[in-house]
Amino acid sequence: MPPKELQKKWKAPKGPKPVQRKNKNTIGLGRALRNARQQENAIEYLPDGEMRYTTEKHEADWVKLRSVTQESALDEFLSTAELADKDFAADRHANVKIIRLDAGVDSGSQPVTLTNAQRETLDAKQRAHAKELIVPRRPKWNENTSKYELDRLEKESFLEWRRKLATLQESNDDLLLTPFERNIEVWRQLWRVVERSDLVVQIVDARDPLLFRSVDLEHYVKETDDRKQNLLLVNKADLLTRKQRITWAKYFISKNISFTFYSALKANQLLDLENELGEEEFLKQYSANDFYNEIKEGEEDMDGEELDELLREKIKILTIDQLEDLFLANAPNEPLITPLPGKESIIQIGLVGYPNVGKSSTINSLVGAKKVSVSSTPGKTKHFQTIKLSDSVMLCDCPGLVFPNFAYNKGELVCNGVLPIDQLRDYMSPSTLVAERIPKYYLEAVYGIHIQTKSVEEGGTGSNHPTGQELLVAYARARGYMTQGFGSADQPRASRYILKDYINGKLLYVNPPPHIEDDTPFTQEECEEFNRELYTFEKLPETRRDQLREAALNKGIETLDLARDLGKLTFSAHTGATEGKEAKSVTHGGKQAALFNAASDLDREFFEMNNIKGNFVTPFHKASNTNSKKHDKKNKKAKKKAAMYSDF
Ligand SMILES: Nc1nc2c(ncn2[C@@H]2O[C@H](COP(=O)(O)OP(=O)(O)OP(=O)(O)O)[C@@H](O)[C@H]2O)c(=O)[nH]1
């Protein structure tokens, strides 16, 4: 018998062998990506015969233009290496430690509260080093300079600049530098704006113009071409009182600084109103001058001081048309740049400034005033914007950038909007500054809270300003901001709201200029006097004023003086003081908040014990409770009382 054939397992029949075909499709995402990468990373032959090849990912222009003001030590090391054109190979086993000498804004050695003497010493030191606060210069170039050469020269010059500033910081521990811009691409924009502008306008915040002003930028403009002009636009001037404008104007005039006051916010409000009402009706109802300058005829010499003609002109907040005229009056008569063939020559005005000083608002007001719709036409270089205002004027808007300057402490930088609030870790130093600058009664009136301060015996400062913590705790408790868990006052959250109010001017403080005679700073007391007019009833938000008016009427107070009477009023979460009892705040939420309330009430009662008869009960001593019945509720209270009194 033939051997039995093993039955084969059935397999699915194989199809025809697949033929590898070339994908003839020349379009498609994958291919596009590959091609783009190949092009980007193609080998470059430099003019000096060298070959350059990079595998680096090329980034879009907007990514390159991101502002860099705070770098980690490693980032800083790498960007310096890149600027210096150095190559580094990573070595797995080497233990590398980066020691950062330029501590930048991370140094925390600056005290928050400065005495007059400390401030004066620090200020003198800052003045001595003021010349070292430089902006990077673009190296000289002409049409024969090649792109690569210029790029290399720019990087060298930038690196040199960064080294100088690092040395300045290193050798002066107690001086704090602003977190100046560290991205060369952003400075390149500024260089281009300066080169093409006939007039460079530095926009600064009126609350602290000198912190936002770069003196060296003005020098740089003059170095580029002596015919170019500088102008300081003091924006947000609506936040200053007339007296404050006079003081600042006197300072600027004495220092020969070309300046003007402006309020982009008011200008834009006025424009909106005009659009709403129509031009004719608007002119009938509002005279622009009234809207801008709250001073009426006859009130001018109210302070008993004769203002000369120049000063009287200079303290005015300009209207949009006046500002445009001033630009033209300050710019050279003829544009300095010869136009390209076929193009008309036009006066170019460069606008530069820190972020958040109101640059966009200023441009919007200028552009919005034109009845024609003006689209922003990107310039040749794509990044900074050129906006044609009229046939004779062109605006160049430079990205906002932080110049190197001195500050007293980090809190000041946060309060001025230079350091962002949302990434804030140390919320206490800026909050302390707010508590120090704004009087306690005004903080209470704005927020409708009562801020409980410690007396000197309890370890408080004894001044009439709360500490930062006292302010934050009172605010958080009144608003019910509690942390999870044990439920203590959420101070970081409270600080964010308070600091935002400070930055947008709801809580207002204006820095005075240095003394004209000797450039020394104002003392603490002079600063308080300089700002006194800002903390009146009229400056409060309207709803709060209504509340206070009503509360004052309830108490029979006719003329309300915030500093004197606020403690007596009951409004919002502020409960006024009544005979013998001090003012307190209505607080919300959290176990700890409840404990805090109970504790302070108990304390108050305990220290007032002199006025009451003593009540003393001991838990183990029941004198004459003879009734053995367990639930003898009837008359229990009366019996207890009787028992208690029988002890005495
Ligand atoms: N009170 C007051 N606030 C102003 C004025 N101008 C601008 N602001 C406010 O300041 C803030 C910043 O204004 P922006 O115009 O965005 O400032 P910017 O300089 O363009 O800021 P970036 O876009 O970050 O560069 C906004 O909240 C404005 O409402 C002004 O004249 N008065």
Image (cartoon, grey):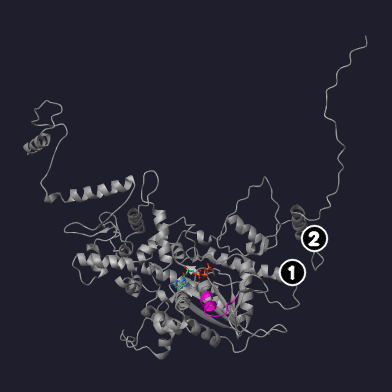
Q: Where is the N terminus found, in terms of image quarters?
A: top right
Q: Residues within 10 Å of mark 1 (few under 14, many from 20)?
A: few
Q: Nearer the viewer, residue 270 or 244?
A: 270
**Callout 2: SS:** loop
Mark 1 is on which residue type? Tyr
**Looking at the rendered structure, which numbered label has been put on residue 268?**
none
What x and y, as percent, mark residue 139? 67, 74
Whether 366 is among the magenta residues is yes
Residue 214 visible in the current orientation: no
Position of residue 597 in the picture relative to residue 277 (left or right): left
Q: Which residue is mark 2?
A: 43
Position of residue 635 in the picture relative to residue 208 (left or right): left
Q: Nearer the viewer, residue 545 or 617?
A: 545
Q: Which residue is mark 1?
A: 148
**Callout 1: SS:** helix
Mark 2 is on which residue type? Ile
Q: Which residues are magenta?
A: 364-374
Q: Quadrant of residue 40?
A: bottom right
Q: Where is the C terminus found, in terms of image quarters?
A: top left
What x and y, as percent, mark residue 66? 60, 63
Tell me the residue at 35%/52% (across/down).
Answer: 480
Position of residue 205 in the picture relative to residue 145 (left or right): left
Q: Nearer the viewer, mark 2 or mark 1?
A: 2
> Which of the two labelled residues, at mark 2 and mark 1, occupies the earlier sequence position?
2
Q: Quadrant of residue 530?
A: bottom left
Q: Is residue 106 above or below residue 395?
A: above
What x and y, as percent, mark residue 188? 64, 70
Tell me the residue at 42%/79% (across/down).
Answer: 248
